[in-house]
Image: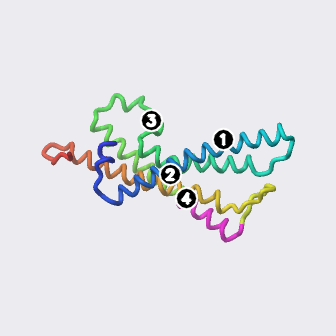
């Protein structure tokens, strides 16, 4: 799939790959920032003996963001967890068909999560929902993570499905091969 992704000429798929790369960098930055925030909290709380208010909540939101934003990048790089108990015994063509089927199911699941996340975000926006902590930030910010991350992952699944269909068409006898 990496060869197909690298050779894409379609501007839409190139844009999806670019967005997934940017989301991957944002995910890595969020993990780094969460680590620094937790270290800062430990120093302030246990060395300086002062109370902390926002650090744990902020680090949790950063790690949630890293998870959902990093999902599209992980899919693009084919680094999601695979259980190969059955697939190692399948023929290459059957593996491609199974991958196509599971990608379509995953696309529907991610699109559904993106849609429900957008509904949840809109309710928080309209209702002016805030966290119940002392920090009391508007929930629209952390709630935006789910629809953005799953929306981008859905787009990456569309690209993966297009790649898989191209591979399957190229593997038929008499079908033109993609170079």
Q: Secondary structure at mark 1?
A: helix
122 to the left or right of 134: left
Q: Quadrant of residue 84?
A: top left
Q: Is residue 37 above or below residue 112?
A: above
**Most extreme residue toward the bottom, as rendered?**
126
Q: Are marks 1 and 2 in contact (CB under 8 Å)?
A: no
Q: Label 1: how many residues lie within 10 Å, few (<14), some (14-19) or many (20+)?
A: some
Viewer-nearest of labels 2 and 3?
2
User: Residue at horizontal 77%, vertical 59%?
Assistant: 136
What residue did someone put label 2 on? 23
Distance from disc 1 to disc 4, alpha carbons, whole Å, reads 24 Å
The image quadrant where one finds the N terminus is top left
Q: Label 2: how many residues lie within 10 Å, few (<14), some (14-19) or many (20+)?
A: many
Q: Please report the bounds of the magenta region as a residue range.
A: 115-128
What residue did someone put label 3 on? 82
Relative depth, front residue between 140 and 18:
18
Distance from disc 4 to disc 3, alpha carbons, whole Å, reads 24 Å
What residue did someone put label 4 on? 147
Viewer-nearest of labels 1 and 4?
1
Viewer-nearest of labels 2 and 4?
2
Q: Magenta span: helix, strand or loop, mainly?
A: helix
x, y percent for residue 26: 54, 50
Q: Secondary structure at mark 4?
A: helix
116 within the magenta span: yes
Distance from disc 2 to disc 4, alpha carbons, whole Å, reads 13 Å
x, y percent for residue 34: 65, 44
Could you say which disc has been placed on residue 35 in the image?
Answer: 1
């Amino acid at each position: 799939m990496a060869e197909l992704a690298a050779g894409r000429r379609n501007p839409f798929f190139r844009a999806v790959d670019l967005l997934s790369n940017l989301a991957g960098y944002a995910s890595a930055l969020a993990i780094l920032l969460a680590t620094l925030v937790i270290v800062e909290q430990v120093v302030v709380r246990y060395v300086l003996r002062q109370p902390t208010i926002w650090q744990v909540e902020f680090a949790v939101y950063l790690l949630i963001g890293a998870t959902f934003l990093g999902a599209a990048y992980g899919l693009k790089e084919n680094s999601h967890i695979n259980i190969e108990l059955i697939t190692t015994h399948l023929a290459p063509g059957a593996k491609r068909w199974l991958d196509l089927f599971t990608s379509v199911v995953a696309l529907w699941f991610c699109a559904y999560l993106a849609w429900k996340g957008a509904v949840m975000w809109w309710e928080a926006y309209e209702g002016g929902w805030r966290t119940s902590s002392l920090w009391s930030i508007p929930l629209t910010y952390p709630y935006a993570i789910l629809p953005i991350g799953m929306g981008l992952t859905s787009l990456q699944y569309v690209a993966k499905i297009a790649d898989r269909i191209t591979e399957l068409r190229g593997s038929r006898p008499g079908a033109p091969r993609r170079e």
